[in-house]
Image: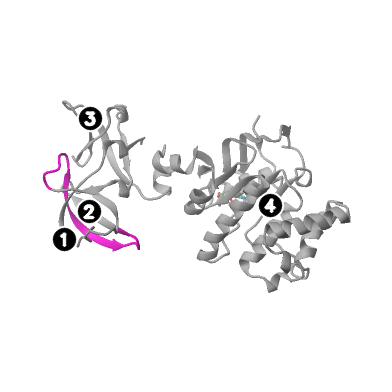
């Protein structure tokens, strides 16, 4: 059995369905991100696992035990919030000891645990400081140390990095992953930030209006989205609506605009749908390249290391193309006539 199992978990508030049909298995030591826009049910799911919100129906199993009806304090689950929730009038050491005392850990062992978690988060020399004497990143590390000192079976993070500035957030992503790996604790991480989920998680659960839209590794979610919602929410996609079209010697997809796109035969199930193509999969090619599409650059935007071009095709379709700014790659100008193409395998077919 998996380390954490959620079975048909559901939560309704009156007529509002916050979470529905939520099935998930998490293995020991895994780091799983719950990702989705605001209101999709991430926090409700996390709170049900923590024991703060009773599910309307469904089951929660941790380490082979059904904990659905257990109160929060008997689940041995640690929570890390965005606002740290440190006691401002207590030193770092006292903040960590507080939880250990509440759990009746004897003082010799508590002392040892405080020392070891402070070393783990690199704050051994700060144990006598008060929270106001620490940076945001250090406060977040104390919050994490305090939870880890209790040796939880499961670590739950609720948007823990939202209060930090952009640069520190990126550092803390690595830091949290390092600590989680070192301790070997199983973790669930709620975020609305796709980059956070992509860079941190072993697996991502994408939620759409209370339901799981897709579960997979960051690469699976990005390269093989299963729904239009996932393809749209994670990164940028170009969408072409239409249907596969039988043609001699070549599999084609005919868009409602009349545009014809080459696809792999196995990517053409016959029904109407949507093709999703990532902007970085599209290349500029010369006029004699076979099956290329002519267009005109309507907008050229600097994205730092990448250029983003908005191209209007002859069919009227608008396509976003990303091109790395590499040596010998010329930057194109608005109004320039171009031809583009992409490999048929890079078109992902989605049922509409
Ligand atoms: P997320 O964390 O993804 O932003 P939530 O889990 O907070 O989403 O909310 C999911 C849905 O449930 C939303 O429509 C929200 O308004 C509703 N909801 C959450 N908590 C409550 C509550 N205590 N009472 C009523 N509705 C709630």
Looking at this rendering, what residue extends furthest in the left direction?
288
Could you tell me residue 217's position as x and y percent? 49, 40
Instruction: Indicate which disc, 3 or 1, sits on the residue closer to the N terminus.
Output: 3
Q: Is residue 43 left or right of residue 65?
A: left
Disc 1 marks which residue? 335
Crowding at label 1, few (<14), some or many (≥20) Cα neighbours within 10 Å? few
Disc 1 on helix, strand or loop? loop
Could you tell me residue 236's position as x and y percent? 36, 50
For the magenta stretch, what is the residue range? 287-307
Task: Respond yes or no on whether mark 1 lies under 8 Å from ligand 1.
Answer: no
Contact check, label 2 and label 4, Cβ < 8 Å: no
Instruction: Indicate which disc, 2 or 4, sits on the residue closer to the N terminus.
Output: 4
Instruction: Indicate which disc, 2 or 3, sits on the residue closer to the N terminus.
Output: 3
Residue 262 at least partly seen:
yes
Label number found at residue 228: none
Contact check, label 1 and label 4, Cβ < 8 Å: no
Tell me the CA gap for discs 2 and 3.
24 Å
Total number of numbered discs in the rendering: 4
Tell me the CA gap for discs 3 and 4.
51 Å
Disc 4 on helix, strand or loop? strand
Label number found at residue 79: 4
Instruction: Indicate which disc, 1 or 4, sits on the residue closer to the N terminus.
Output: 4
**Quarter containing the C terminus:** top left
The vertical placement of 80 against 210, above or below, is below
Q: Is residue 89 left or right of residue 35?
A: right
Looking at this rendering, what residue extends furthest in the bottom direction?
133
Disc 3 marks which residue? 251
Query: Viewer-proximal residue, 183 or 299?
Result: 183
Tell me the CA gap for discs 1 and 4.
53 Å
Tell me the CA gap for discs 3 and 1.
32 Å
Could you tell me residue 171's position as x and y percent? 55, 60
Tell me the CA gap for discs 2 and 4.
47 Å
């Amino acid at each position: 059995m998996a380390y954490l199992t959620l079975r048909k978990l559901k939560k309704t508030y009156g007529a509002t369905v916050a979470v529905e049909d939520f099935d998930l298995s998490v293995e020991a030591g895994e780091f799983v991100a719950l990702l989705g826009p605001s209101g999709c049910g991430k926090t409700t799911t996390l709170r049900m696992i923590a024991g703060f919100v009773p599910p309307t129906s469904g089951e929660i199993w941790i380490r082979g035990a059904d904990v659905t009806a257990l109160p929060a304090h008997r689940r041995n689950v640690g929570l890390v919030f965005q606002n740290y929730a440190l006691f401002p009038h207590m030193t770092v050491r006292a903040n960590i000891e507080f939880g250990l005392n509440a759990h009746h850990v004897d003082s010799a062992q508590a002392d040892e645990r405080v020392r070891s978690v402070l070393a783990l988060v690199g704050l051994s020399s700060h144990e006598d400081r008060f929270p106001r004497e620490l940076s945001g990143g250090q406060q977040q590390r104390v919050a994490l140390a305090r939870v880890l000192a209790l040796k939880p079976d499961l670590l739950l993070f609720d948007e823990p990095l939202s209060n930090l500035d952009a640069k520190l957030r990126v550092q803390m992503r690595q830091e949290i992953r390092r600590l989680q790996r070192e301790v070997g604790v199983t973790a669930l991480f709620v975020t609305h930030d796709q980059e956070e989920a992509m860079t941190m998680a072993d697996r991502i659960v994408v939620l759409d209006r209370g339901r799981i839209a897709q579960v997979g590794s960051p690469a699976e979610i990005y390269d093989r989205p299963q729904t239009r919602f996932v393809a749209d929410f994670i990164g940028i996609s170009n969408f072409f609506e239409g249907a596969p079209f039988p043609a001699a010697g070549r599999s084609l997809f005919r868009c409602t605009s009349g545009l014809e796109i080459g696809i792999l035969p196995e990517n053409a199930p016959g029904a109407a749908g949507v093709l999703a193509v990532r902007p970085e999969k599209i290349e500029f090619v010369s006029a004699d390249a076979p099956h290329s599409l002519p267009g005109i650059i309507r907008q050229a935007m600097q994205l730092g290391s990448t250029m983003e071009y908005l191209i209007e095709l002859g069919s009227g379709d608008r396509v976003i193309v990303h091109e790395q700014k590499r040596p010998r790659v010329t930057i194109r100008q608005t109004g320039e006539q171009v031809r583009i193409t992409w490999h048929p395998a890079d078109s992902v077919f989605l049922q509409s």
